[in-house]
Image: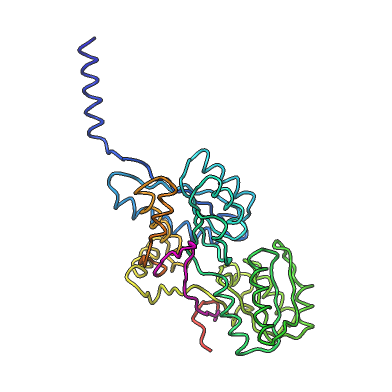
């Protein structure tokens, strides 16, 4: 029996030596809108992040990246539940997320627990809520500034239609105030509950004001707004932000979406500006049979930067310090440098919808 036990111990020791030895699993949590009004964003982001996970793990030899994705269901309440699970059960040192309302709900939790939180929400000033909060995405103020400039150049009677969401309210207010300073008054300012499916009352009031341009700020409800506006005979130019590129918008509005002008972070997978963008676009098309969207690339880049930081240390303070040192990261979404306030500056372009396709806007 003694000889047998000794033999078993030797076999066990040999197996341990032969087994792949990971120094640690590097855990990263993600709270994405996999369902709900912003689910298209979640789908894009999850796809981009899946490419990053495979690339990182093929590069690492002594550790493994484990990405744990939870569904925010596009709302803050479910996002908080997901955050608590990631912190107490999965014990992640960092969490990635998106959407303004969700980020605002998670920021205090990240701050209390000293957990690094990254977001692609566009609300200006959002990173000021916590020294542990980083943003790798365009700033909504840059997008609104482009739309203000476009309005001042071409239109005289603007109107606004916006969902009752924090980011949309901020964008509407910034647009109205900037135009007022230029001596241009908004002829109609209409809001609606974020879950509305009938906007005819608001659109009828806008039509009566006879605008020549209408700023629409919503998620996929943008498609409903365009469709019902044209059905009511509202003949005005529609402008907006990236939401116009959600597949549901053209899917719902169809030809009513044609001619709409919107802002988007500068990103062209068909004419990539860098080797990193070209490689990412090629791999994305190979896996998913479609061109990548900018937020898929943004989250892909953020996961690579987080993995580099968390791979060196699992301590949130050290992850934070490492991210603050990121300068000129050559990512798929462009070059990233984190500013002292943990924000970034990203260029913005104008695009339009033509025959259901998204193409660069030509004045």
Q: Quadrant of the N terminus?
A: top left
Q: Residue at x 65, y 77 (%)?
A: 175
> Who is closer to the viewer here, 341 or 159?
341
Position of 13 with respect to 71 (left or right) is: left
Position of 210 with respect to 2 (left or right) is: right
User: Is residue 51 at all visible to an observer of this figure?
Assistant: no
Query: Bounds of the magenta span?
Result: 335-355
The image position of residue 280, as x and y in percent, is 37, 65
The image position of residue 252, as x and y in percent, is 63, 70
Q: Residue at x 79, y 83 (%)?
A: 208
The colour scheme applied to this rendered structure is rainbow
The image position of residue 337, as x and y in percent, is 41, 66
- Residue 289 appears in which quarter of the rendering? bottom left
Question: Is residue 350 found inside the magenta-colored segment of the image?
Answer: yes
Question: Is residue 218 found inside the magenta-colored segment of the image?
Answer: no
> Who is closer to the viewer here, 233 or 362?
362
Q: How many marks?
A: 0
| Residue at the limit of the structure toward the front, as seen here | 340
Q: Residue at x 58, y 78 (%)?
A: 145
- Residue 206 appears in which quarter of the rendering? bottom right
106 shown above or below 229: above
User: Is residue 121 at all visible to an observer of this figure?
Assistant: yes
> Who is closer to the viewer here, 85 or 308?
308
89 shown above or below 354: above
Q: Residue at x 56, y 66 (%)?
A: 122
313 shown above or below 323: above
Position of 271 with respect to 146 (left or right) is: left
The image position of residue 4, as x and y in percent, is 22, 14
């Amino acid at each position: 029996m003694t000889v047998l036990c000794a033999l078993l111990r030797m076999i066990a020791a040999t197996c341990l030596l032969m087994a792949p030895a990971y120094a640690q699993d590097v855990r990263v949590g993600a709270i994405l809108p996999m369902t709900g009004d912003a689910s298209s964003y979640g789908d894009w982001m999850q796809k981009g992040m899946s490419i990053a996970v495979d690339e990182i793990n093929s590069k690492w030899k002594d550790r493994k990246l484990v990405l744990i994705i939870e569904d925010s269901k596009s709302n803050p309440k479910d996002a908080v539940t997901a955050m608590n699970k990631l912190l107490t059960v999965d014990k992640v040192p960092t969490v990635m997320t998106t959407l303004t309302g969700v980020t605002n709900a998670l920021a205090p939790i990240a701050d209390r627990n000293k957990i690094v939180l990254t977001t692609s929400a566009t609300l200006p000033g959002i990173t000021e809520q916590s020294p542990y909060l980083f943003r790798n995405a365009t700033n909504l103020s840059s997008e609104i500034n482009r739309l203000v400039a476009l309005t001042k150049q071409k239109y005289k009677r603007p109107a606004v239609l916006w969902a009752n969401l924090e980011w949309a309210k901020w964008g509407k207010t910034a647009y109205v105030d900037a135009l007022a300073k230029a001596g241009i008054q908004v002829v109609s300012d209409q809001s609606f509950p974020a879950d509305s499916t009938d906007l005819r009352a608001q659109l009828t009031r806008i039509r009566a004001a006879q605008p020549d341009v209408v700023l629409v700020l919503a998620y996929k409800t943008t498609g409903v707004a365009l469709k019902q506006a044209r059905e009511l005979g509202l003949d005005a130019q529609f402008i907006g932000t990236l939401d116009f590129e959600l597949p549901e918008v053209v899917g719902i509005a169809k030809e009513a979406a044609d001619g709409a002008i919107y802002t988007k972070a500068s990103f062209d997978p068909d004419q990539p500006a860098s080797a990193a963008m070209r490689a990412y676009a090629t791999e994305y098309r190979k896996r998913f049979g479609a061109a990548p969207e900018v937020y898929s690339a943004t989250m892909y880049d953020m996961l690579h930067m987080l993995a580099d930081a968390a791979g060196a240390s699992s301590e949130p303070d050290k992850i934070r310090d490492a991210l603050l040192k990121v300068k000129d990261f050559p990512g798929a979404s462009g070059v990233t440098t984190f500013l002292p306030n943990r924000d970034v500056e990203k260029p913005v372009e104008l695009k339009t919808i033509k025959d259901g396709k998204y193409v660069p806007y030509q004045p």
